[in-house]
Image: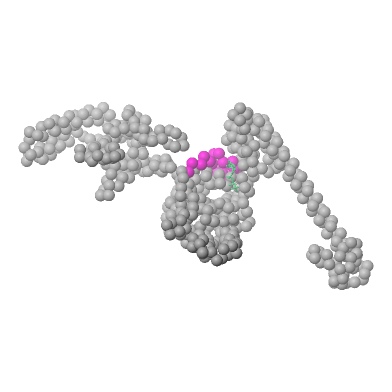
Amino acid sequence: MFSGEMFTGFGSAIGGLVVIWAMFQQYIPPQLRDHVERYTRKLVSLFYPYIEIVFPEFAGEKLKRSEAYSAIQNYLKENATARAKRLKADAIKDSTQSLILSMDDHEEVTDVFKGVKVRWSSNKTTPKNASISFYPMTEDRRFYRLTFHRRHRKFITESYVKHILTEGKAIAMKNRQRKLYTNNPSQNWFGYKRTKWSHVVFEHPATFETLAMEPNKKREIMNDLKKFSEGKEYYTKIGKAWKRGYLLYGPPGTGKSTMIAAMANFLNYDVYDLELTAVKDNTELKKLIIETSSKSIIMIEDIDCSLDLTGQRKKMEKDDDDDDDETDNPVKKMEKEEKKGSKVTLSGLLNCIDGIWSACGGERIVIFTTNHVDKLDPALIRRGRMDKHIEMSYCCFEAFKVLARNYLDIDYHPLFTTISGLFEETKMTPADVAENLMPKSDSEDPETGLRNLIEALKAAKELEARNKAEEEARAKAEKEEQEKKENGVKEEVKESGKSDKEVKANGVINGGVAAKEVKQNGFAV
Ligand SMILES: Nc1ncnc2c1ncn2[C@@H]1O[C@H](COP(=O)(O)OP(=O)(O)OP(=O)(O)O)[C@@H](O)[C@H]1O
């Protein structure tokens, strides 16, 4: 039976032999040393039934950090660190403030995979002639050693190592710090401006669990995202770029931005927040898109406003022309030229969505948001470009329950019945519901939040009713006015015996209504 003790026993035996060999080496004539060493190794291998594989941290000519080493490191951090007795605290995860622990140097742990036990040790050698460095220990050469019984050779080299590398990469992906990129204008030494991506760590706390939305709709979106992220082979098979477009539309405060953050957290993707109004022209847009990485969401918020850009630029150009047409300032002149000859166009954007992504490879999601879906050009949002249209709407009772759990830590309260009724009678955005529920102090109990919400819902209902009544009264008055005018003209025609045309031409009034006025207002005469 393969056991940790046996490993250790043989390990010390071999260690002893190495020491003895080092001591006696000096008494052996140099010409015989090679032979003696070879035969000693053969002898040892007769009694030592274990195989060792070494994974150095740096390999190859360019001394690039080995991917295998990193994967093993991640795998061991996640799976074996709990069993190691000597640990090393590497760093502190910024958001959770928790230590990242890994095996200390020269520490050993066992791992069992499909019933086969192996031993991992983390090792370090320091070259004797290491140069004096400002940063201590940079010359250290680290490596992992995998030891296993020779009867498992095939299994370990073919299955286990593959398993470790795949797992290690997946762990790295899961634990990596994701980034939120934004495009900002930057000026080079010659004064030319171009927008570049800059990033911060993406740490938005929104998840699908905390997103207030009708549960079936939420599930449908999550399934869609999952299918997409696992769809590499499918997209290759059908010959389509591995991308998917989402259009999120709805009034302000219904959670469009929150949804994007939840999507990014669900998929573990980076986010590129593309501000179209800061992009000089279509060429620059292409460059920015090409620079985005795989496994990312590219979002353009308020797309209707961004594409209005053309009009805004024209206005700016005109203002500039009026202001300083004769300017001698070269930078200002260049800025003006840049503004004049450049813009992001709808067709440029469409080309980017359709064309460039196909060539980029890797998975990407593009999301547009808008408050006014009806304003968008149908070409921009047709299926195939924006594959899924998601309406973000006012809060329903199911969505409220999510917010009550998030903000008040409750799943039920007798006041829920009143709130459920009010949601059927009035509209409120999740942002407003959240604002009302949010406790104003640590000592505030959940009931206060619920009562605040009830008051706000009642006020919203009253306001809606008042607005509706005012609207109806206005419509009624307009209708009456119109009828009065129409009757006046009819009477005028009847009494004067003139034709409609004449009444209109003369502008004669009868019943207080001028035919001219009638004509101006476009009433049917
Ligand atoms: N569906 C929701 N679930 C959870 N929280 C929400 C939801 N909708 C809004 N909120 C809360 O309201 C705040 C504003 O929402 P958000 O910015 O996502 O809305 P939006 O639809 O993107 O608005 P805008 O159109 O003005 O950009 C969020 O920070 C969040 O706290």
Quarter the N terminus occupies: top left
Quadrant containing ligand 1? top right
Q: Residue at x 87, y 71 (%)?
A: 506
Whether residue 290 is visible here, answered yes or no, is: no
Q: Nearer the viewer, residue 323 or 395?
A: 323
> Does the segment drawn in magenta span residue 100?
no
Q: Residue at x 87, y 63 (%)?
A: 513
Q: Does residue 251 appear to the left or right of 123 in the view shown?
A: right
Q: Residue at x 85, y 71 (%)?
A: 505
Q: Nearer the viewer, residue 475 or 137?
A: 137
Q: How is the image coloured?
A: one colour
Q: Nearer the viewer, residue 12 or 509?
A: 509
What's the magenta region?
Answer: 202-220
Q: Is residue 437 above or below residue 374?
A: above
Residue 259: percent from left, percent from top: 55, 45
Q: Residue at x 58, y 65 (%)?
A: 321
- Would you say the magenta stretch is mainly helix, strand or loop? loop
Q: Does residue 509 appear to the left or right of 177 in the view shown?
A: right
Q: Is residue 284 above or below residue 44?
A: below
Residue 213: percent from left, percent from top: 59, 42
Residue 347: percent from left, percent from top: 53, 63
Q: Nearer the viewer, residue 54 or 216?
A: 54
Whether residue 124 is visible here, answered yes or no, is: yes
The image quadrant that residue 190 belongs to is bottom left
> Does the segment drawn in magenta span residue 212?
yes
